[in-house]
Image (cartoon, rainbow, N blue to C red):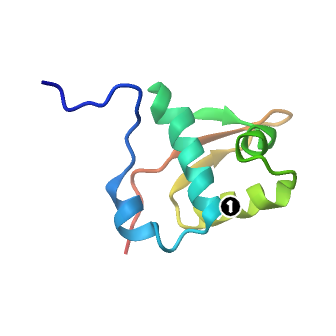
Amino acid sequence: MSKFIPNSFQLPNIIIDKYLYTLSDFELKVYLIIVRKTKGWQKEKDNIALSQFKKILRIKDDRTIRRALKGLLKLNLIKKEENKGRESTFKINLNFDPS
């Protein structure tokens, strides 16, 4: 019997063990969206526009998303590639120092 749960995605244990109580609500939600849009579709990275985050989270203010992304980048939990004239590319960073 397989231990894989169909229609699911993996989340690094450290997110729950260390960061669940320190990430803001929106940092955690944005992180989960990035995990879903990448690992949930077996991709290493994905282009995600601010408008996509806003639609999924049902919010209107870009600043909320930008603050969450900035926090995740500061903790080195995600990586971001700027794409001139297009949405940014995001990926989960599994090689960060959790100390």
Q: Position of residue 98 (x, y in %)?
A: 38, 69
The residue lying at 26 percent from left, 30 percent from top is 4
x and y percentages locating residue 61 in the rendered image: 87, 55
Q: Quadrant location of residue 90?
A: top right
Looking at the image, residue 34 sits to the left or right of residue 56; the answer is: left
- Outermost residue to the left: 1
Q: Position of residue 5 (x, y in %)?
A: 30, 31
In the depicted structure, whether residue 38 falls above or below residue 73: above
Q: Is residue 77 left or right of residue 99?
A: right
Asked whether 36 or 74 is in front, the reply is 36
Residue pictured at 40% horizontal, 50% vertical: 94
Within-10-Å neighbours for mark 1: few <14, some 14–19, many 20+: many
- Up the image or down, 8 lies above or below 96; here it is above
> Does the rendering let one see residue 30?
yes
Quarter holding the C terminus is: bottom left
Between residues 5 and 96, which one lies in front from this camera angle?
5
Residue ID for mark 1 = 68
Residue 10 or residue 43, whichever sits in front: 10
Q: Is residue 44 visible?
A: no
**Circle 1: residue type:** Ala
